[in-house]
Amino acid sequence: MREDGVYAAMVRRGMTRRTFLRFSAAMAAALSLPAAYGPRIAKALEAAPRVPVIWIRGQACGGNTEALLRAANPTAANLLLEVLSLDYHEELLAVAGADAASPLAGLASRYPNGYYAVLEGSFPTGAAGAYCLIGGRPAVDVAREVATGALLTLAVGSCAVDGGAPAAPGGITEAGGIGKVLTGGNFIALPGCPANPSNLAAVIVHQLVAKETMPTDLAHRPLAFYGNLIHNQCERRPHFEFGEFALEWGDQGAQRGWCLYKLGCKGPETMANCPDVRYGEKISWNVSSGVGCIGCHSPSFWGAMGPAYRRLPSPLPFLPNLTTDLVGGAMVAGIGGVAVAHGVGMTIRFKRYKAQDRRAKAKAAAEAASATETPPTAEPEAAAGTETAAAGTGER
Amino acid sequence: MVRTVIDPVTRAGSGLRVELDVAGGAISEAWVSGTMFRGLEATLKGRDARDAWLLADRICGTCSGVHALASVRAVEASLGVTIPANARLIRNLLGGTLMVRDHVLGFYQTEGPNWVDLKAAAGADANATAQLAKLQSDRAGSTPEAFKAVRDRLAVVTADGAPGAMGRGWWGHPAYRLSPEQNLLLAAHHFEALDWQRNLMRIHALMGGKDPHPQTYLVGGMAVAAPWGGPKGQTGRDHPKVPDRNAPDALSTEGLLLVEGILAATRSFIDQVYLPDVRVLAKVYGDWAAIGAGIGAYLSGGEFPVDTGEGAARFLPAGRLQAGRLLSPQPVDAKAIGETTVHAWYANPNGDAALDGPATGGATPVWPANLSLPLTTLEGAAKYTWIKAPRYDGLPMETGALARVLVATADGRQEIAASLGALLTDLGLTMEHLPGVLGRTLARAVEADVVSHQAATWLADLRTNLAAGDLAIADVTWWDPSSWKAETDGYSLGEGPRGTVGHWVGIRDGLITSYQVVDGSTWNASPRDDSGGRGPIEAALVGVALADPARPLEALRVIHSFAPCGGCASHVFRPTESTR
């Protein structure tokens, strides 16, 4: 056991050996490993050093920090407040001002053995980054510096992954996620609004134990958490298969806990482990509480997955009633095929959305450019500001 | 005169910067700047009015659900929908538990490090601390061993040069005045509060389906449905088995029992730990009652409706108090609210000095050419923040727990008056001592006390309704947008933990065409207006003495007493057509 290590810190936190082993077993479960891996994780954690964490918030609502504070057994708060050492986090630091921001200067010399970076919120490049400042500097620059030098960067929450709400259709700050910050390198994306804290804890423990990044999909999402459709894990799936649907909010179907597909649930097109990890110490998740999935773990979900209450269209346009026909009850065997087809539909829809988004942005840029030629007001500040915004658009 | 910059102001959401002029050991002038802007209202345009609340809630993940509620209410008002009693009770439960959670965590997590020297706590006597705790309450777990464990832990995390969130506090600052044992007592409870709030918020996960950002709000009521008594699906061999998640339905008997248990645990922490701790702090720092009063005018939008229907009375009443007349509440008229961008980074086609109503005003974000990045100082900048300046009848207003408690007291609300009276008597203070830094902390304690009691009543009412067979949870007779008027507008005014929240919405053909939010932190962290009148936090900072201007701890006490949230405050605007 290392005195400056993770296990020693947990013991100082008042954790007993028994709790520590239970924690390790829970971590094994969270990583989709057999229970036998629990003791191995415990052994690895005993020898693991504490790693400093720099948590940078851009245009954030704070929801992912809050999620972290809600996490239980294993508590992510323990992980970050004590097991790791959280050297920068605007919401949790005891100190303020330049004294708070001091770790951000001279990262390499301050952390010779490296550090982890966590990004929360989106990062705007509009108005030369002035839409979000940290200590007077554009947050996108701060995040880039921090992430570039990190052993590993975690983009936590949909805003940090792809821009989230500030980058939703109509957004005006040129906000983006980790793509604005890193062009390559070692990062893990944990989308979700908010990301589930137990997934965050599991990623960190995996890093400490296995000393390598978790296997991820092409979107850098850990396969252990984002490898399965919500629809396939949902407890209401049997009602879907038997054609039992809630048709109106609060109706008898809703009271019986029937499938929410026809009220707009995006579970058939969303890859995440919500039905399994849930929220509030596994007390519930949205479908258990009676409302459908909004697809918040999906790419650009505010644009690509909406409107929230519209039933997912048929995955195959030439068979508009494909799904409802299928779920009539008799054709249960076809359901697996529907899930696959929905996967295809999801990809098509996302690509279509991205193309629309690109066209809209190009149009906005053209309009902004023409606006610059004739400044809307005579006020010098306003005119200069428009130029800055247009320059930001032009870079893209 | 020396310019002191605090950026970031930590523990205040994202993007809050404060600049101070310090002369003769005191703050002579102050500027509060919001440095984070998202423009979420622009992304709301064109969305289905029924799901706009989902995105609106992303304004804040700390006061999670507050903006969801404000948004569904605004749309309900525009459609003229009345929600069922059960939905009202669940909304009150969610909003009430959030308020209690925010006040308690705000005391320990946000304000705590301003008053409690965690490093000095590491030198405390654990036995003496346990005796101190015994004087507070006979709570189990307040043992010398427990305090010794916390002390040893603090010694490690607050050691000189120690990494982590507590390693670089302004420990040893002359403004810290608690004894080592009092420091240790409050520090230990700080860590307990983190665990306590986690349990409390399970109510949100259960009834909201997700936490933060509950997902069961619905225009017309709530989506969480009362469980069906009989078999869930068609019986028979062919029906696939429904897996058991081993978690109760939110409105089942077991679910409500779970909520009841959590509320009881919440109460006992408030009675045995939080309220006694507030008294410990207030007795030592009694002089802070006279510091940081600010503008002395208060606004409350009212919260927790006691009945269904528009204009129903609220448990915490709406009202407004003019400076110097704290006993005569005035009614609140949403039409009197206007915002000016004269000192904010926006261009308003009606002129920056105009006080535009939220429903009609428009402004475009513009970063000024005379400010270069990185920003070193805002000195000399006429425009200095992303936060607009909301005004009521042209005057700044303080909002938040103190405003609500003062309005409720002036309104003659017994529950508030009784709790407040008991606390003030115990501390040897009077109503005149409330406007100020300490008063804001005391008001939060009173509110947490009263609302956590009231939550049990809301739960009991909900149970009674369900038991009597009233399972109505949402009115969806108007759900189809084709049944709506082609043009409709609405607004809502209510209260989140940190102040008055107003949402204004314009709907055309079922889609959002305009959206505007004025949040509690917009009011409190507002910049100056056209007449030069400071915002509430700015006004409260002026005159505050700083023992060590390089470590402006006293300024943090004033700022955090308002519980500001930089992110909530500064996103708000309504784009003009030119930005589309």
Image (cartoon, coloured by chain):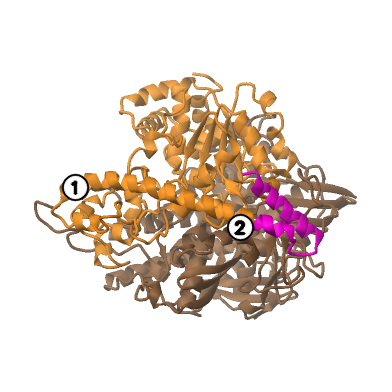
Chain colours: A orange, B brown
Mark 1: amino acid:
Gly
Q: Is residue B378 above or below residue B221?
A: above
Residue at mark 2: chain: B
For the residues bearing labels 1 and 2, Cβ distance under 8 angstroms: no
Occupied quadrant, residue B544? bottom right
Discs 1 and 2 share one subunit: no
Residue B325 locus on image (x, y percent): 72, 77
Check residue B39 in the rendering and tell me which mark sits there, or answer none. 2
Q: Is residue B8 above or below residue B449?
A: above
Question: In the structure shown, which secondary structural element does the residue marked by tag 1 occupy?
Answer: helix
**Apparent side of residue A144 relative to residue B527 in the rendered image (left or right):** left
Task: State the residue at coordinates (43%, 38%).
Answer: A199
Task: State the residue at coordinates (28%, 46%).
Answer: A341
Mark 2: amino acid:
Gly
Residue B75 locus on image (x, y percent): 48, 71
**Apparent side of residue B317 relative to residue B27 in the rendered image (left or right):** left
Inspect this view and state whether residue B452 appears. no
Q: Is residue B15 above or below residue A379?
A: above
Of helix, strand and loop, which mostly describes the magenta segment?
helix
Nearer to the camera, A183 or B552: A183
Residue A291 locus on image (x, y percent): 35, 58
Q: Residue furthest left?
A: B237
Question: In the structure shown, which secondary structural element does the residue marked by tag 2 occupy?
Answer: loop
Q: What residue is disc 1 on?
A: A334
Nearer to the camera, A376 or A140: A376
Inspect this view and state whether residue B295 appears. yes
Q: Magenta segment: does it hold A388?
A: yes
> Magenta part of the protein: which range?
A367-396
Q: Magenta segment: does it hold B517?
A: no
Occupied quadrant, residue A245? bottom left
**Apparent side of residue A325 relative to residue B235 in the rendered image (left or right):** right
